[in-house]
Image (cartoon, rainbow, N blue to C red):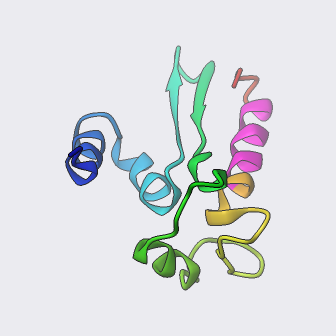
Amino acid sequence: GYNTDSFANTLQTSVLKPTDQHTFLKGGYYYRSFHNGGLLILSLNTVIYSPFYESSSDDKIHENNTNDNRPDNSDKMHDDDPRGQFTWLKIILSEARRNQSRA
């Protein structure tokens, strides 16, 4: 079978920058900056919206995470913004607009 832990470890150590690791580990989303910040490529996690997605014990950790800068500090899978990725997206897009970057 495919070892997802090995894949995640490889991604984390060879692709992600230390600044990306918090959001990637929290919810599978991150961004990369190119051309001196003029271009941002964003990666969102859409797996959690699949009808075939089954929550894991990691989701219980995320459900109880209270250090995510969300107003209500909730991170439940039934929320409109599981794992805070849409809140994060709004912040990144606002920063890109302010810096006249493309995203």
Q: Main secondary structure of the magenta part?
A: helix
At 48% from the left and 62% from the top, the residue drawn is 26
Q: Nearer the viewer, residue 34 or 5?
A: 5
At 24% from the left and 35% from the top, the residue drawn is 14
At 68% from the left and 81% from the top, the residue drawn is 73
Is the residue 92 above or below the residue 69 in the image? above
**Residue 58 sits in quarter:** bottom left
Q: Nearer the viewer, residue 25 or 51?
A: 51
Q: Position of 90 compared to 76: left or right?
A: right
Q: Nearer the viewer, residue 92 or 5?
A: 5
Is the residue 98 above or below the residue 25 in the image? above
At 29% from the left and 40% from the top, the residue drawn is 11
Q: Position of 84 compared to 30: left or right?
A: right
Magenta span of residues: 88-98
Residue 75: % across, % down: 64, 74
Residue 25: % across, % down: 42, 58
